[in-house]
Image (spheres, rainbow, N blue to C red):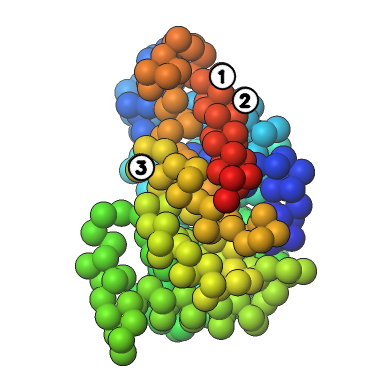
C-alpha cells in the first residue's frame, strides 16, 4: 500500500491528505435541514448530514489528491449511525481511487491490539469466511505501550500489504509534556523515531516502509532531526493551515527525492467556505471552496519545495 500511496502522490503532484473530520458546525445548514427532514434531529439525521457533506467534498477534490484521513472520533460521537457514516465514507473514497488513512490512534496490547488491527486493516474469521470490517489502507497507532501494542498491527500490515503511521512528535501544543522529556540524554521523540525505523525495516515497500510516522508541521526543527533518524519512513504531517503550519515549515520533512512526507489539512479544507478567503463561495459552494483550498495548499507546498 505504501507503493500505491507514493504512486498516487507522484501522479497528482500533491503530497496532500485531506482530513475528513466533520463536525456539524462545518456542515452547511441546507444539508442539515435535508437530513433532519428525512431522519429527524437524531443520531441518524446527524450521520446522514455528515455523510452527504463528506461526499460533496470528495466529489470535488478526489482528482487532485492521493489520500484522505477520516478521524474516527468525529463519527463515533454519533454512535452506531456515525460509524456507519465512517464506513460509507471510507468505502466511497476507495471507490474514487483514494488511499484511506483511518485516524484511529489505537494502542493497546496482546489480543486487544490484534483485534483493533483486524477490525481496521485485516479480516475477521467468521466461521470459514474471512471478512473485512472497516478496511482502511493505513491507520494511526499510539506507541505508548511499546512493541506489544505495535507489532500486532505490523503483523496484519504484512499479511494485507497495508500500513500504519505511528505517533512520534504530534502537532498539539502540550505534546512536549511527554514527547520532549529527556531520556538518556535525548528527547523521547527521537527514541520513538528510532524504534519506528527499526519496526519499519521488517516490512519495506520498494523504497519506503509500510511503517510510517506522525510528526507535526508545527515542529519543523524536530521534523528535520526525525527525517534523518527515519530515512525510509514516510511521515504523515498534521498541523498545516488551521494549526499554524505553512509550506515553508514543511521542506525538512521531505527527502531529496521529493518524497517521504504527506501533509494533512482538515478544517482548513473541509470548512474552507467558512474562511474569509473563500467566503464568496457561500454555503452552497462549500465543496468548490474546498477544491480551491486544496489547489492553494498544493501551490504553497510546491513553491516551498522549489525554494528549499
**Vertically, is 148 above or below 74?**
below
Residue found at the very far bottom of the displayed protein: 184
Mark 3–mark 2 distance (CA, rounded to whole Å): 25 Å
Q: Give coordinates of residue 83: x percent, y percent.
A: 46, 45
Q: Which residue is mark 1?
A: 288
| Residue at horizontal 70 percent and vertical 59 percent from the top | 257
Picture layout, residue 181 above or below residue 89? below
Q: Residue furthest front?
A: 307
- Is 43 on the left-hand or right-hand side of 228? left
Residue at image point 64% right, 81% down:
201
Q: Tag 3's secondary structure?
A: loop
Q: CA distance from mark 1 to mark 2?
A: 6 Å
Mark 1–mark 3 CB contact (< 8 Å): no
Pointers 1 and 2 in contact (CB under 8 A)?
yes
Which residue corresponds to mark 2?
60
Question: What residue is disc 3 on?
Answer: 244
Q: Residues within 10 Å of mark 3 (few under 14, many from 20)?
A: few
From the viewer's perspective, tell me whether residue 22 is left or right of residue 209.
Answer: left
Give the Cα distance between marks 1 and 3.
23 Å
Amino acid at each position: 500500500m505504501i507503493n500505491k500511496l507514493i504512486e498516487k502522490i507522484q501522479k497528482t503532484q500533491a503530497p496532500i491528505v485531506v482530513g475528513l473530520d466533520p463536525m456539524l458546525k462545518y456542515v452547511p445548514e441546507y444539508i442539515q435541514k435535508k437530513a433532519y427532514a428525512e431522519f429527524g434531529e437524531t443520531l441518524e439525521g446527524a450521520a446522514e448530514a455528515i455523510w452527504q457533506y463528506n461526499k460533496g467534498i470528495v466529489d470535488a477534490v478526489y482528482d487532485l489528491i492521493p489520500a484522505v484521513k477520516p478521524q474516527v472520533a468525529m463519527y463515533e460521537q454519533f454512535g452506531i449511525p456515525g460509524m456507519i457514516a465512517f464506513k460509507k465514507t471510507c468505502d466511497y473514497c476507495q471507490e474514487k481511487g483514494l488511499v484511506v488513512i483511518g485516524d484511529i490512534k489505537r494502542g493497546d496490547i496482546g489480543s486487544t491490539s490484534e483485534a483493533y488491527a483486524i477490525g481496521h486493516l485485516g479480516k475477521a474469521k467468521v466461521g470459514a469466511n474471512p471478512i473485512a470490517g472497516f478496511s482502511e489502507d493505513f491507520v494511526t497507532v499510539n506507541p505508548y505501550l511499546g512493541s506489544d501494542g505495535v507489532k500486532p498491527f505490523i503483523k496484519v500490515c504484512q499479511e494485507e500489504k497495508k500500513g500504519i503511521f505511528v505517533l512520534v512528535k504530534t502537532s498539539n501544543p502540550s505534546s512536549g509534556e511527554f514527547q520532549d522529556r529527556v531520556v538518556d540524554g535525548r528527547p523521547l521523540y527521537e527514541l520513538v523515531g528510532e524504534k519506528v525505523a527499526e519496526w519499519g525495516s521488517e516490512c519495506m515497500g520498494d523504497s519506503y516502509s509500510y511503517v510510517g510516522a506522525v510528526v507535526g508541521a508545527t515542529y519543523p526543527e524536530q521534523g528535520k532531526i526525525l527525517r534523518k533518524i527515519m530515512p525510509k519512513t514516510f511521515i504523515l504531517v498534521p498541523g498545516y493551515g488551521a494549526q499554524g503550519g505553512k509550506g515553508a515549515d514543511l521542506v525538512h520533512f521531505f527527502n531529496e527525492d521529493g518524497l517521504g512526507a504527506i501533509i494533512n489539512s482538515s478544517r482548513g479544507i473541509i470548512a474552507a467556505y467558512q474562511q474569509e478567503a473563500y467566503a464568496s463561495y457561500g454555503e452552497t459552494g462549500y465543496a468548490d471552496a474546498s477544491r480551491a483550498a486544496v489547489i492553494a495548499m498544493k501551490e504553497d507546498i510546491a513553491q516551498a519545495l522549489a525554494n528549499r
